[in-house]
Amino acid sequence: MTVAMTTKVAEKITNNLAEIRQQLQILSEESPHQQSVKLLAVSKKHSLEAIKAAIAAGQMHFGENYVQEAVAKITQLKEQTTDPVQWHFIGPVQSNKTKDIAQHFDWVQSVEREKIARRLNEQRPDDSQQLNLLLQVNIDDDDNKSGLAPEQVEALAEYVMNCPKLKLRGLMTILKAGTTEDEREKSFQQMYKLYQQLQQTYGEQIDTLSMGMSGDMRQAVLEGANMVRIGTAIFGERES
Ligand SMILES: *Cc1c(COP(=O)(O)O)cnc(C)c1O
């Protein structure tokens, strides 16, 4: 990329971030839950340069789906900057990838099996802080997607609570594509209920409900999301 082009891309990212932050501010005031909302920038398939532009604009939480791609970026960035960036793994977790995830990430949002939790706990390096964990819930029973059924949440939560290197923080969901506004509302509301139940059981450490992407951010926040995961609206379309 030429320098001029890089600058233009960086400007676009800066502007997009500013706009989304403003929207989130308005939405959280509009929301009956009055929650503040964290923005996770989903940088999968986007370059290190794009990530650096977002960091320069104050963005510190990034989400990645592919272990190899993510580890390369995380490692390079650590060599180049000292910014306190937090990395969230949000893709399906294969058991042969847990070691890399446990070593390089700060959060895993897509845990849905005891076996994965056990491996992450065993493989988290001793000198690292606890790995923050969200349980992924398949709230609308989508065959194409991973995630726990709602009635399985309690058992896995209890398991994670007993893992010393893991810190349970809450729940994550991805909704089925092509649903109506009413269906989404129902799913988000069910997630909020599950989240509240988890808070009742485990108290203040449960502080994160991750739902809403570029297409359904507004509705998710109005139903109580306090973390949204936004890729396209920040970085533009991904090449597949
Ligand atoms: C890719 C991805 C996102 C971001 O999606 P956009 O539509 O680009 O905002 C959010 N969450 C998960 C789990 C993803 O895989």
Image: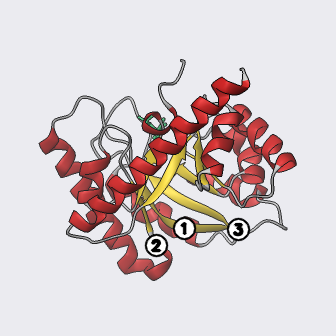
Circle 3 sits in a helix, a strand or a loop, which is it?
A: loop
**Along the viewing direction, whichever of 105 and 200 lies nearer the viewer:** 105
* In the depicted structure, whether residue 141 falls above or below residue 203: above
Q: Which residue is mark 3?
A: 165
Residue 113 visible to an observer of this rendering? no
Kind of residue at badge 3: Lys
Q: How is the image coloured?
A: secondary structure
The residue positioned 84% from the left and 67% from the top of the image is: 127
Circle 3 residues within 10 Å: few <14, some 14–19, many ≥20: many
* Alpha carbons under labels 3 and 1: distance apart: 10 Å
Residue 153 position, x and y percent, is 40, 59
Q: Is residue 149 left or right of residue 57?
A: left
Q: Is residue 154 left or right of residue 52?
A: left
Disc 3 Cβ-to-ligand 1 distance below 8 Å: no
Kind of residue at badge 1: Leu
* In the depicted structure, whether residue 38 falls above or below residue 46: below
Circle 1 sits in a helix, a strand or a loop, which is it?
A: strand
Among numbered discs 2 and 3, the one appearing first in the sequence: 3
Residue 70 position, x and y percent, is 70, 38
The residue positioned 26% from the left and 53% from the top of the image is: 188
Disc 2 Cβ-to-ligand 1 distance below 8 Å: no
In the orientation shown, which residue stands out farthest toward the top?
240
Circle 2 sits in a helix, a strand or a loop, which is it?
A: loop
Contact check, label 2 and label 3, Cβ < 8 Å: no
Q: Which residue is mark 1?
A: 168
